[in-house]
Each structure stands twice: as C-alpha cells, then as structure tokens.
Amino acid sequence: MQLRYNYRAYPDANQRRALARAFGCARVVWNDCLRARKEAHAAGLPYVSSAMLSKTHITEAKRTPELAWLAEVSAVVLQQSLRDLDTAYKNFFDGLKGKRPRVGAPRYKSKKDTRQSIRLNTNSFSLQDNGTVYVAKVGNLKVKWSRRLPAAPTSLTVTKDSSGRYFLSFVVDTEPEYLPERDEETGIDLGLSAFAVLSGGRKVAAPRFLRRAEKKLKRLQRELSRKAKGSNNRNKARIKVARQHAKVADRRRDWHHKESTRILRDNQAVYVEDLAVSGLGRTRLAKSVHDAGWSQFVRMLEYKAAKYGRYFARIGRFEPTSQVCSACGVKDGPKPLHVREWTCQECATVHDRDINAARNILAAGRADRLNASWSAGKTRTKVPAQRGEAGSPRKGQTTQAGIPGL
C-alpha cells in the first residue's frame, strides 16, 4: 500500500528563490499545455497528445528567447507538471463516464495562488547521510525529521502553503502493520453536539477548534481589511491570518489522527454513515460542519483500517438510523433535531438519539458485510496515497529508506 509522509522543510534564501522559479516554471507549463488543449477543442481538432505537448511546450520552448528560463529548473519538474495535467484530464473524463465521483475540468493556475507545489521522481531527489534532502537545481534542504521513513520513497512533492511554510511529502510503498485482532466492533454516528458517538455508548466531545480561534481570527481579519490592497503591510497581515488558519487546521488534523487511531486499535471492524458533507456545507450549519472535518476523519479511518488490518465500511446515507428502534427494530418515524431522547412505542425502550443511531449503523454494517460474504482478510486491500498523490516508477537506487542517525 502507498502512504505519504510529510515533513517540514527549512530552505535558505537562495533555495527559496530556486523553489519559486520551479513553482513558476511548472505553472507555466501547466497553463500553456492546458491552453493548447482548450484551443484545439474549441477549433474542433483532435485531443493533443502528451508527447506533442512535451515536444512543443517544453523541449522546443526552452530554445526560444521568451521561454529560455525554463531550462533553469529540472526537466523532471516540467515533465511531471504535464503528467499531472494528464491525470487531471483523466479524472475529469472518468467522472463523466461514471467511473469515479465527478470533478471539474482542469483550470488555469495563478502565481497569486497561496499554495504552490512541484512533484519529483527518484531521479531528481535523494536522501543524504547528514539528514538533508537533495533536490535537483535547488540544493540540500534542511528537514525536520519527526519519524523515519519505512522504505525508500518513490516520489517527492515540495509544497509551499499559504502561510509561507515549506513541506516535503514522500510517497512510500509499505506493507500493512497488522494490529492484534479484537472481538469488538463499533458503529459511529458523527454529529455536531458530540463529534462522534460509538455504539458502545462512548461519546467523543467536539473540540471545535475553529470556534475557539474565532475571536483572534476576527481581530486579524479586521486588521487585514484595513490595509491598502497591493501593499507590503497587507501581505504581512494576510500571512498572519493564514498562519492562524494553519494552526487551526493542524490542531484538527492532529486530533483526528489520534482519535481515529484509538478507535481502530480498540475495534476489529468500524462502520460509519456515508454523510452528504458537501450538501450540509451549504446550509446554516456550514461553519460547524467544516469545523468538525468529518470527511478528513472518515478518510483517516479508511486508510488506517487497511494499514492495520481492520475492517471498514460505509452504510447508505438514506438508512433511517434515527427512526428505527435498535432494540426491537420497529420504525418509529422521523423526529426533529431537538428531540435527543425518545421512547419506542412498541417495546417502551428509552433511547438516546445518537447512541441508538450508532447501534443501527453497526447492525446495518454487519448485515451488509454478511450479505456480501466478506471476511476480515479480504479488507486488507491496497489504498492509494492520501490527497490523491500518486507514486512514480523507480529508475535506479538514488534514494534510501530512513535517515541514518535518527
């Protein structure tokens, strides 16, 4: 299975300028190739192949006076930008064919985008004995290693986020780390008043990281709004706002990691409801929904279940989990959100709304698993790298597993 390992990088001034050039060149190649394909489509011409785009917009473009500066960065960065465009088009067409969830068509990139990135294969980066990472035409980047890499990485993505931080993201092919088997299984009902309610009765309180940081964010946003557009002071104020948002996102992600790992360590199988988060994000509860980060949490459960040898499944979002009595199975009808406890009219059982829903999710998940005749061993499947990152085929032994001395 492919996993991604992120580390904070600290480039010096010269390396930051080199990375800025690489970000810009990759963006130019993306935009020029995208423009060529859009113009061909508008003129009724055939789809422009990657080989033709590589020849005209990379190889020949370097020889022109206008784009000679493309040669200042690694050729791998430019070729990978074209491959990423191909992947974006493939995802778009697969969505139209129903092979995957729909995504929008590729769009132009701007130098004003707050997130910039380049992708490299094993021919253009290597791990050094002194703990640095060599990147072609950039140099040896200082890295804060929080843990060892379990194997030699197959690709590297260098990213600059909106707050000016640099990260190195390694894609690694690794074997699952099976945990000792457990007898317990759980269903999880995700919510807002309580972030998660487990079928065993445990309630996980919602941390509400964004709500807790709102006061400081409002003050920083007011300061930003007072700055003149295009001024250096406005850019400094923008970075302060971005850093505060980054802190909120980092805290939420760290908490999601810890809670998802705890649940999977305690349970052999985990079942959740397939929530329509994108639809809920357009309601009056949008801020609370995005603050909870359900989608990120469920994705962590999914890939960690494959990593640790656990079973994970989603049940249909239209299952009446809040309407059915988990004791006798009688459907008691819909209930407004303010009703947190109710009594079954058939068996007189008093239910906590969320715990009852979690128990129904567990029962529905078990039934789907039994009907499909799935065993726990068949759940140990390969999971792609998180956030859609794909590995590249290795050509040579220019990288090594782990960092000596750490």
Image (spheres, helix red, strand yellow):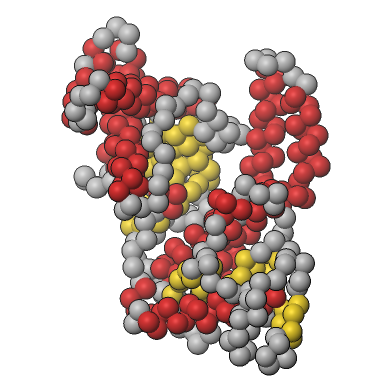
Residue at left 66%, top 72%?
Answer: 334
Q: Nearer the viewer, residue 298 or 115?
A: 298
Q: Nearer the viewer, residue 252 or 92?
A: 92
Residue at left 33%, top 63%?
Answer: 382
User: Residue 65 location in percent, x, y?
Assistant: 29, 7
Residue at left 33%, top 22%?
Answer: 35
In this image, 296 relative to 179: left or right? right
- Taking 88 as reference, is 178 above or below it? below
In this image, 242 relative to 45: left or right? right
Quarter occupied by residue 123: top left
User: Residue 102 location in percent, x, y?
Assistant: 40, 47
User: Residue 127 location in percent, x, y?
Assistant: 37, 44
Residue at left 44%, top 27%?
Answer: 109
User: Residue 297 location in percent, x, y?
Assistant: 56, 60
Asked whether the viewer can see residue 177, the reply is yes
Q: Nearer the viewer, residue 211 or 284?
A: 284
- Taking 399 as reference, is 36 above or below it? above
Residue farthest bottom in this picture: 347
In this image, 71 relative to 406: left or right? left
Asked whether the viewer can see residue 265, the reply is no
Name the quadrant of the N terminus: bottom left
Residue farthest top in this picture: 65
Quarter occupied by residue 187: bottom right
Q: How many marks?
A: 0
Quarter occupied by residue 324: bottom right
